[in-house]
Every structure is written in structure tokens, then in C-alpha cells.
Image (cartoon, rainbow, N blue to C red):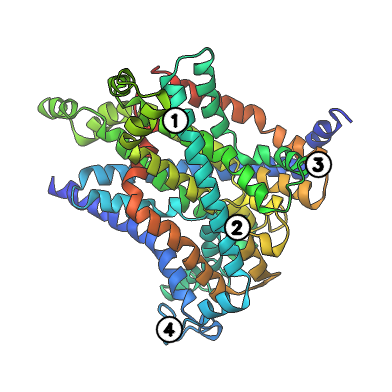
Amino acid sequence: MGLANYAALTRDPIFHKVVWNSAVFTLGSVGVKVVLGMLMALALQQALVARSLVRALLLVPWVIPTVITALTWHWMFNALWGVVNVTLQRVGLQREPIAWLGQPATAMAAVITANIWRGFPFFGVSLLAGMQAIPRDLYEAAAVDGASPGQRFWHITLPGLRLVLIVTTLISLIFTLNDFNIVYVLTRGGPGTATHVLATYTYEVGFQALRWGKAVAVSMYLMPVIAVMIVIVTRYLTREE
Amino acid sequence: MAGRDALAYSVIGVLLLVVGVPFYWMVNTSLKTSAQLQSLAPYYYPRPATLGNYAALLGTTNFPTWMRNSALVAVGTTLTTVLVASLAGYSLTRIRYPGRRLLATTVLIVYLVPPTLLFIPLYTILRTFDLVNSLWALLVAYPTFTVPFCTWLLMGFFRSIPRDLEEAAMVDGATRLGAFRRVILPLTTPGILAAALFAFTLAWNEFLYALVFVHDTELKTIPVGLNDLMFGDIFLWGELMAASVLTTGPVIGLYTYLQRYMVEGLTAGAVKG
């Protein structure tokens, strides 16, 4: 009773693995999402033709059910008939089919890929809105002073996006760290425990092994991390009042 | 400038391709027979295309029931959410009372607490009220995340409306609720639409609560029901992709009409300030 569940977890190698996987999954996904989202926003900011149509099209992955996303990627990563294997073999990048979801490293890469696909448009749309809120005359003044595009990005765009970037990244970190759907549908945490993250492990311990105390303990270990991020987001979002 | 434009359009082209390929593959697969799925002859398009998967899905599986359940839960959640969130958002931005700021912050915090932390406690609460394994479980559980999110979103919209308008109406004898209904609501229609769209989408897409709170096949929503089409290592990919097309259809349809409001709502919260 009491804290026994918490103490037991500190000595549980599976739990350690799950924490590590969650960190890899979250940081890997969010890192790429920031970069792709920034590219998307910069490209949309530059390209004027059909901007809102393109923005709407690129946001579609973000509105469809995550389970569908995961299912579709599951099929595309299929070892025998998946489009990834067949195409890579046809263009000669790969000789033999790869069991993407059956090997630890590629399975982790697969779940991260699906998560990035779903999540980067959110960054793109938020950052684009942030860019549009930066006053035009700052760029004009910089152009008059002969600043290069790189300098303008570094000294005007990036500082102007600071708030949006921090808030969007933190919100994405919170929800990626707690992602259940993609991992559950694509790999069920496997092979072995190679892609088990805190959300899927909590579910497995609680609802399959029916060890409620331990399951709650697993999710409670997330609490401090989540709490810190929530406090920061809340600070930023309620500051102007 | 021309060089940068070319670069921008190539980036957009690549991103559209990355986003588009899985959708194409979903549709392509849904139109193939299982024999065609295991053939490399015409691989990248269905020939001949068949609607057999759709017929099998609608005729031989529980998919129609799951779709009805999903629709019931999503519409029910949307109605509750719009009603509660619009009143709450209005109250939190317009009416002065002690603790209002704290409440507003709490709404935001509650939205940010992820379902992973909440599904076990929620399960025990629902069990106490004997709601587990019924659609009521979802109709009760979904507003716990849609209401805070939509309230927060609507607060931004309410703030943008000048106070004078409703004050004028109230000077003319309207009650506060009357002014809210006849003056404020018509002006916040875009916000309400965005909130409704978000509530519907979040409920339609939800998976974890539906997986945990409901067990009977006839009560499942689509995302959970689809797991019944996977038997161990045997996946009915044709049917699964047909189901995916039918499940994304309503969301994309709604989104096509309302995306402008959705993007506005999505960026209103994070961007200002």
C-alpha cells in the first residue's frame, strides 16, 4: 500500500524503457514538427497564390481521426504489400522488403513518422498566423538597411514568433507525450516493448493486467512534467490580461 | 525574389505530396479486391476498381451501427458543448464576480490536462454512476475536454465585441440573457461555428475513452469498432481503408465549409498578445 507502487516502478526495467521511449518519441516528433511547421509557414508566407486553399489542404491531416491516420500508415508500412517497401524496392533504394513495424528501430521511426504527419500542420498554421502579426515595416526597414533574408529571419521573424513558438511547442509536447492512439494502433507498443510509451503502458497495466494502483502510479510520474509545462503555457496565454 | 518564390512553391509542392500520398493510398486500397491488394501488376491504381469493400463493410460488419453511435455521440457532445461553452465564455469575459480570473485560468489548465492522466479516474467515476458500457459514458466524458477548449476559444471571440452594444440593448430594457441571445450571439456566429466544429471533430475522432468506457460491439464508435476488423495478424485492409474513407468523409466535408472559422479559432488563442 501507500507508495509501494511508486517505489516498485523505480526498479522496474520495463518502466525505465517506457520512459526512455516516451522521451525519444516526444522529442523526435516535436523536433521535426517544429522544423516542418516553420518551413510550411515560411513557404506560405512567401507564396501568395492560393495561400488559404493550400493552408486548408495541409491542415487536413490534423482534423481526421488519429486512428485512421495510424491505420493508413500501418498499411503503408506493411512488410509485404506496403507502398513504402514496394516503392523503395522499385526505385532501387532497397533490395529486400523491410518489416518496418517488426524491428525496434524502424518501428519507433514509423510511429514518429505518423505522429509528425498528423501534427506538423498545426505548427505551420500557428506560425503563419504569428508571422502575419509581425509588422511589415520592420522588414522594410531591414531591407533598406541591406539585411539579408537570413538576417531578417534571425533578427525579425524568429523574435516576433517567440511567444507563438513557445506556446505551440509546449502544447504539442504535452499532447505528444500523452499520445496513445498512434502507438496503440500501429504497434501496440511492440515489438516487445520497443515502442511502448507512458500512455500505452498505463492502458496495458490498468486495463489488461488490471493492476490499477500500478497504472495510476505510472501516469502520476508524468504529472510533474506536465504540470510544469501547463503552468508555463498558462502564464503566457493569460499574461495580456 | 523569383528564386525565393520558386523555393517556396517547391516546399509547398513537397508538403502537399507528403500530405496527399496517404489519402491517395487510402482511396486506392479501398477500391481494390483482396486479390488485387496482393498483386504488383497494376499496383499504384485500382484496375478494375471495385466497390466490393464498401458493400462488405456496410452489409456484413457492424460499421453502420458504429457510424450511428459515433454520430449520436458527436452531435450530442457538440450540442452540450456549444450551450455550456458559449454561456461560460460569455460569463468569464463579461460579468464581474470574485474568482473570475482564477476560473478562466482553470478552464485553460483543464483543457491542457491530457486524457492519459484522466482516463482511469474517470473510469472509476463513471462506474460509480453505473454509466460504463453505455453511450452515456461518452456523452458525459467528452464534454470534459470539449467544454474547456471551446470555452477558451469563445472567450477570445467575446472579448473582441465592444461592450457598448449589449449595454445599449440592456438600457433599452433587454435582460442580460436577452442581450446575449439577440446581440452577442449573432455577432459571434463565426466563433460558435468554430467551437461546434472543434467539438464535433474532437468527439468524432476520440479513441482512448471510447476504448476504455465501452465494451459491447453494438455500442462502439467507429475508431474503436475498426479494431474488430483486425483479427490478430489478419487485417481486412480493403474494408479498413473503405471505412477510413467513410470516416474521414464527414470531417473533411464539414471542414471544407467551415475551415475559415476553424483556422481563425485555432490561431486566435495562441497568437494574440
Label 2 sits on residue: A107
Could you tell me how far apart the alpha carbons at marks 2 and 1 are, in whole angstroms? 29 Å
Q: Chain of mark 2?
A: A
Q: Say whether disc 2 or disc 1 marks the residue closer to the N-terminus.
A: 2
**What is the number of callouts on the image?**
4
Q: Is residue A141 above or below residue B185?
A: above
* Number of other residues with Cα within 10 Å of mark 4, as a class: few under 14, some 14 to 19, many 20 or more: some
The quadrant in which residue A45 appears is: top left
* Residue holding disc 4: B49
- Disc 3 marks which residue? A212
Labels 1 and 3 positioned on one and the same chain? yes
| Circles 1 and 3: CB atoms closer than 8 Å | no
Label 1, label 3: how many angstroms apart (C-alpha)? 33 Å
- Residue lying at the far top in this picture: please name it: B98
User: Residue at horizontal 82%, vertical 31%?
Assistant: A7
From the viewer's side, name the closer residue of B151 and B264: B151
What residue did someone put label 1 on?
A: A167
Q: Is residue B19 above or below residue B116?
A: below
Q: Is residue B227 above or below residue A3?
A: below
Task: Give percent across and percent down for residue B233.
Answer: 68, 71
The residue under label 3 is which amino acid type? Trp
- For disc 1, the chain is A
Residue furthest front in the image: B173
In the rendered structure, are the residues bearing label 2 and label 1 in contact, judged by CB atoms less than 8 Å apart?
Answer: no
